[in-house]
Image (tube, coloured by chain):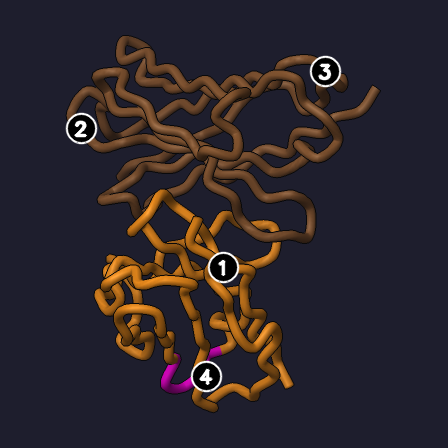
Chain colours: A orange, B brown
Amino acid sequence: EIVLTQSPATLSLSPGERATLSCRASQSVSRYLAWYQQKPGQAPRLVIYDGSNRATGIPARFSGSGSGTDFTLTISSLEPEDFAVYYCQQRSNWLTFGGGTKVEIK
Amino acid sequence: QVQLQESGPGLVKPSETLSLTCTVSGYSISSGYYWGWIRQPPGKGLEWIGGIYHSGTTYYNPSLKSRVSISVDTAKNQFSLKLSSVTAADTAVYYCARQDGDWFDPWGQGTLVTVSS
C-alpha cells in the first residue's frame, strides 16, 4: 500500500496570504495524484487531478505541482472560502488518501 | 449535472451487515465510468472502499475485500454497498462518488452510519 503523508497538519494563515501544502508518497506515483477540498459538514470536492490539472470550476489561484513522490498544492492568495481541510489521493497502486492538512484562519 | 445521493439505515448492530444505496441522477450509469464508495470515520481521514463499472466489474480495497460487496442496478440507475460483520470501527460517514479516471468527482453528500447495539 502506498502511504501518503501530508504536511503540515495545520496551516494558520490570513486571507490574501499564500498557502503551500505538501504531500509525500512512500513510493513513486508518477503524476497520479489528486487534491480535494473538504469544508465542515460537506463532501470533499476535487480540486486538482493528475498532479497539476484544475478540476472544473476551480479558480486559477489553485495550482498543483510535483511528480514521483513529492507534490505541492499552492493557493496563491487565500480567499475566505478556501479555509478548509485538503486531502491528497493517489491512484498509482490501488487508491489511498493522505491524512489531510487543515488550512485555518490565523 | 450529475448528482449522487446515498440512502440506507443510519444505525447498524455489531456483527450485522451494513447496506447502502447510491442513486445517480443527471447521468446514466450505463454510459460509463466506475462508481465508488469512500468512508470517513468521525473526525478522521478518507478511506476508499471499492468501485464498480456498469458492466458489474468490481474492485475493492484489499483491507476490506473479505467483507465488501458492491453491486449495480442500471435499470434504477443505482449502485449499492454491503459491508458484513461490522464493528464500531466501521462507524463513519459513507460517501458515493463517480470515479473519473480513479479520481472522485462528483460526490454525494454522505450518510452517517453508526454501528452500535
| Residue annotated with mark 4 | A19
Mark sitting on residue B32: 2
Neighbour tally class for label 1: few under 14, some 14-19, many 20 plus, Cα within 10 Å: many
Q: Where is residue B104 shown, x and y percent of the image?
A: 35, 45
**On screen, residue B114 above or below A54:** above
Q: Where is residue B106 shown, x and y percent of the image?
A: 35, 44
Q: Amino acid at mark 3?
A: Ser
| Residue annotated with mark 1 | A98
Q: Are marks 2 and 3 on the same chain?
A: yes
Query: Of helix, strand and loop, which mostly describes the magenta segment?
Result: loop
Helix, strand or loop at mark 1: loop
Q: Amino acid at mark 2?
A: Gly
Mark sitting on residue B15: 3
Q: Quadrant of the C terminus of chain B?
A: top right
Indicate which label's residue lies in the foreground, 1 or 2.
1
Q: Are marks 3 and 1 on the same chain?
A: no
Span shown in magenta: A75-79
Q: Amino acid at mark 1?
A: Gly
Q: Where is residue A95 shown, x and y percent of the image?
A: 38, 45
Q: Quadrant of residue A48?
A: bottom left
Q: CA distance from mark 4 to mark 3?
A: 44 Å
Q: Chain of mark 1?
A: A
Neighbour tally class for label 3: few under 14, some 14-19, many 20 plus, Cα within 10 Å: some
Q: Where is residue A61 shown, x and y percent of the image?
A: 32, 79
Q: Amino acid at mark 4?
A: Ala
